[in-house]
Amino acid sequence: MEAHQEAVAHISSQIFSFHQKQVPFRLYHGSTNSTQSRKIDPERMVDTSQLNHVLKIDDKSKTCLVEPNVPMDRLVDAVMPYGLVPPVVMEFPGITVGGGFAGTAGESSGFKYGFFDSTVNWIEIVLATGEIVTASPTEHSDLFYAAAGTFGTLGVTVLLELQLIDAKQYVELTYQPTSSIKETLAALKAACEAETNDYVDGIMLAKDRGVIISGKLTDEVASRTRTQRFARATDPWHYIHADRITRGSLEAVKEATPLRDYLFRYDRGAFWTGRYAFKYFLVPFNRITRYLLDYFMHTRVMYHALHASGHAKKYMIQDLLLPKASAEKFIEYVSNEFDFWPLWLCPFQPKQELALHPRHDDIRKEEKGDSLYVNIGVWGPGSTTYSRFVEQNRLLESKVCELGGVKWLYAQQYYTEDEFDSIYDREW
């Protein structure tokens, strides 16, 4: 803790100095999972990249003390030897604890535990004045709930206590094929309502074909249940495997996957966006080429390439959160407007007010008692004409707002200031 305290004191001193001079500054984390391109001026920068340690694991209270730049894979590897795992683990290994907290991140356990920030007990945060504050649901609670999802704009989070749950060796997966958007969303809701499920997400492979993937933590694999891995170069990409084993049938398929492989199952290929790189470089997209180019198809490498190439201004990479009641209309819109597949479906039951207090219409009331939201991942090539590309993104933003949803702000944004204020509660 002594090294942590020294690092925080240095950060506090830097921020105090910037505040005294009224100089705006940016944070440098050393890595990013945002698609936004940002230039960092070394003279106007606070470097938090060294806050990357798991400081304490308490297997009795099932908690751990973690600095913000600890990535998901290192966090999982630190706590699993204790028989524990975070309740919510983001699907890309390089997403950090601080990024998950500041960006309202989540994953396929979100229907059960909410967003990642709902699993944080308390934070240590450096305010704009340089003051170091501890915030929790009972201490500086307004700051604690406000800091989640506001992208570091209210302060620099430097330490977090995370909740943990009991881990198991495997996740028993059920792949349930579906044949329409409506059926897929109904199956998604049913899987969330099954009390035995620990993980639920879905892939809309085409307008008339989807698959809902539900998972249960287990230490025992039935004798006739096949074990499937996803982490090795010789393993299939997860979405390709889900497509292959459910094609041409409406029968559910059961398999078991090692827990760590499951948590980062979308790392290789970044869901399915990696296939666009093959198309761009005119490389055949098959099992052999995926094996040979495996190093370049992991998300840490792909994010570097995304920023270096400028392709963030050519590809739509947007995650949109819709009330389940309007999700079907939104998917129909994406189908008609863009017609690229697959789409990712990830259900959430928020445990508290959504970050930044959006003023969205409460369309959930159309389905009494249904508080389920669906994150829809819309990732694919946009127009090659930049003005049209911007227009496409603005139309997407407008449709989300119309249907009572919000978008994740890690991505490129095209709102005017007035539009942003019409969605989010600036006064709050």
Image: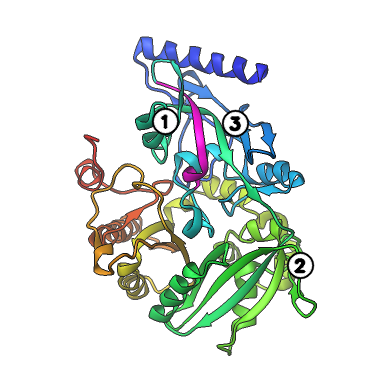
The magenta region covers 116-127
* Residue bearing the label numbered 2: 220
Which circle, 2 or 3, is nearer the viewer?
2
- Whether residue 367 is visible to the viewer of this picture, yes or no, is yes
Q: Position of residue 115 (x, y in %)?
A: 47, 50
Residue 20 appears in which quarter of the rendering? top left
Q: Position of residue 249 (x, y in %)?
A: 58, 89
Amino acid tagged 1: Thr
Residue 146 appears in which quarter of the rendering? top left
- Whether residue 343 is visible to the viewer of this picture, yes or no, is no
Amino acid tagged 2: Glu
Residue at left offset 45%, top offset 62% = 347
Quarter containing the C terminus? top left
Residue 219 appears in which quarter of the rendering? bottom right
Residue at left offset 61%, top offset 67% = 215
Give the number of the disc on residue 138. 1
Instruction: Indicate the secondary structure of the residue bearing disc 1.
Output: loop
Q: What crowding class fits label 1: few (fewer than 14 Cα within 10 Å), some (14-19), or many (20 or more)?
A: few
Q: What crowding class fits label 3: few (fewer than 14 Cα within 10 Å), some (14-19), or many (20 or more)?
A: many
- Residue sitting at the far front: 60
Give the number of the disc on residue 67. 3
Residue at left offset 34%, top offset 73% = 328
Amino acid tagged 3: Glu
Quarter containing the N terminus? top right
Q: In the rendered view, tell whether residue 225 sits above or below residue 7.
A: below
* Sequence-first disc among 2 and 3: 3
